[in-house]
Structure formats: C-alpha cells, structure tokens
Amino acid sequence: MKRAGLEDFRWHDLRHTWASWHVQQGTLLHVLQELCGWETAEMVRRYAHLAPEHLAEYAEKLAKPRVVDITGTNLAQGKNGTEKKRDHIAVVP
C-alpha cells in the first residue's frame, strides 16, 4: 500500500470496485444483490448510479417529438375522406 501511495484503503474497497464493475458491465441489480449476498435492494442501489445506460431506453421514448391527431381520427384522412386541416394535429414530446 505504501509503494502504491494508498493511504485510506480497506478490503471492503475491493468489494465496492467489484460490484461497480459488474454494474458498469450490465449485471442486473437483483443478480448483483444475490452475488454479493445483500439482504436488501437498498444496498445494491448504491451502485446503480454507475450505469445510467439502463435508463436510456426509457428516456429516448420521449426524446423525439411526434405528431398526433388530437381529434382521434386518422391523420391521413378526415372522417369523410377529405384531407384534414393542420389545426387538428399537435406536436407532443
């Protein structure tokens, strides 16, 4: 430890590093909980912030605006088959 310049090292730090590497590689949190022997999900959530990629799929769902018909009819045609006016559509996140 002296040669490496480590002053505040604890063996628990290795466990923390190991768990962090697992999360960064995509190990599911409930699997990590079982691997580490933690009794509560709260303990394993301490490592969840290290891999926010699992949230990207959900965040991207709202990333692109989409056009929706606010009248509830088909965007391509109106109820009587004529083209609809633009004031019947809205862009939503």
Image (spheres, rainbow, N blue to C red):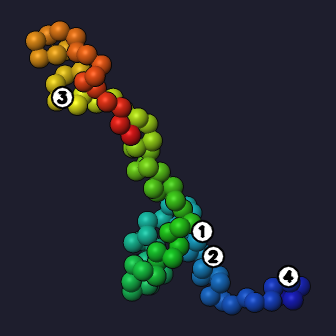
> Mark 1 or mark 3: which comes first in sequence?
1
Q: Residue at x 53, y 67 (%)?
A: 49
Whether residues under marks 4 and 3 lie with C-beta atoms below 8 angstroms apart, the answer is no
Quarter of the image for residue 15 reads bottom right
Q: Position of residue 27 (x, y in %)?
A: 48, 65
Asked whether the residues under the numbered discs 1 and 2 touch, taking CB atoms below 8 Å apart as contact, a structural biologist would say yes
Mark nearer the N terminus (2 vs 3) = 2
Residue 35 in view (yes/no): no
Question: How far apart are the two marked residues, 4 and 1, measured between alpha carbons?
Answer: 21 Å
According to the image, label 1 marks what residue?
21
**Residue position for label 4:** 4
What is the distance, in whole Å, between disc 4 and disc 2 at their CAs?
17 Å
Residues under labels 4 and 3: Cα distance?
68 Å
Q: Quadrant of residue 12?
A: bottom right
Give the residue type at disc 2.
Thr
Q: Total marks drawn?
A: 4
Q: Amino acid at mark 1?
A: Trp
Pick the front one: 28 or 87:
87
Viewer-nearest of discs 1 and 3: 3
Q: Does 72 sit above or below residue 77?
A: below
Disc 2: which residue: 17
The residue tagged 3 is 71
